[in-house]
Amino acid sequence: MIYKVKNMYLYRVDKRQFKTGAEILPNSQFENELQGEAQQVENILNETRPNGVPERKYCLFLFHELTGALTFWLKYGGNIYSVIPFSQIYYMGDMNKIDNILDLARFSEDADLLRVAANEYWKDGTHTFKPCFEFLVDIAKVVGTIATERELQRFKEECKKLHSIERTSIYKLLLNR
């Protein structure tokens, strides 16, 4: 299924630096850095992907919600950009399901079970209790950087104290920008 969305702002977390108006292309090198279960899960996701969806290394992953981008940033760091998809959206999946597949890969070597879990990621209309939707696209255009490095550091400190993204002052500030 091809998702068509116009005038939609999404979020991109990326270690690369971009200016407003720049086009972001996939960094296909990310798969070269994967090891162990993470590489195994990417391979299975690529093997089970629907027709018409490029391999994941040829896609950008854009977050639908600010909370998803901030959660990912807390785990991996980088820059958070507000972006507009500049190509068709190939797929919208719940990123939490990928974490579930990673957990399965850590505790089971059952390839059939991993394929079933990967197919569940690719199944339209299913999601976890609190989904973290990611959109797979070819290109996105930067609208702007959503927070300064200082704001993100303050956000990280508040998150540790409050154990919540939505309760931080920076999250509330960013929602109103």
Image (cartoon, rainbow, N blue to C red):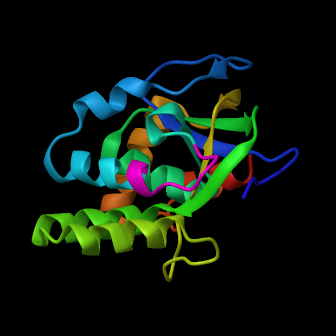
Q: Nearer the viewer, residue 51 or 125?
A: 51
- The verdict on residue 48 being magenta is yes
Query: Residue 50's image quarter?
Result: bottom right
Quadrant (top left, top right, bottom left, bottom right) of the N terminus: bottom right
Residue 169 visible in image: no
Residue 7 visible in image: yes
Taking the image as shown, residue 90 lies to the left or right of residue 121, namely right
Quadrant (top left, top right, bottom left, bottom right) of the C terminus: top right
Tell me what residue is drawn at x 57 percent, y 36 percent.
147
Q: Which residue appears farthest toward the right when viewing the image? A: 6
Q: Which residue appears farthest toward the bottom when viewing the image? A: 129
x, y percent for residue 91: 63, 54
x, y percent for residue 173: 64, 51
Main SS of residues in magenta: loop
- The verdict on residue 41 being magenta is no
Taking the image as shown, residue 108 lies to the left or right of residue 93, namely left
Residue 49 higher or lower than 153, as above or below? below
Look at the image and give the residue range highlighted in magenta.
46-53
Query: Residue 31's image quarter?
Result: top left
Tell me what residue is drawn at x 52 percent, y 57 percent.
68
Tell me what residue is drawn at x 66 percent, y 48 percent.
90
x, y percent for residue 103: 22, 68
Residue 4 higher or lower than 27, as above or below? below
x, y percent for residue 165: 47, 63
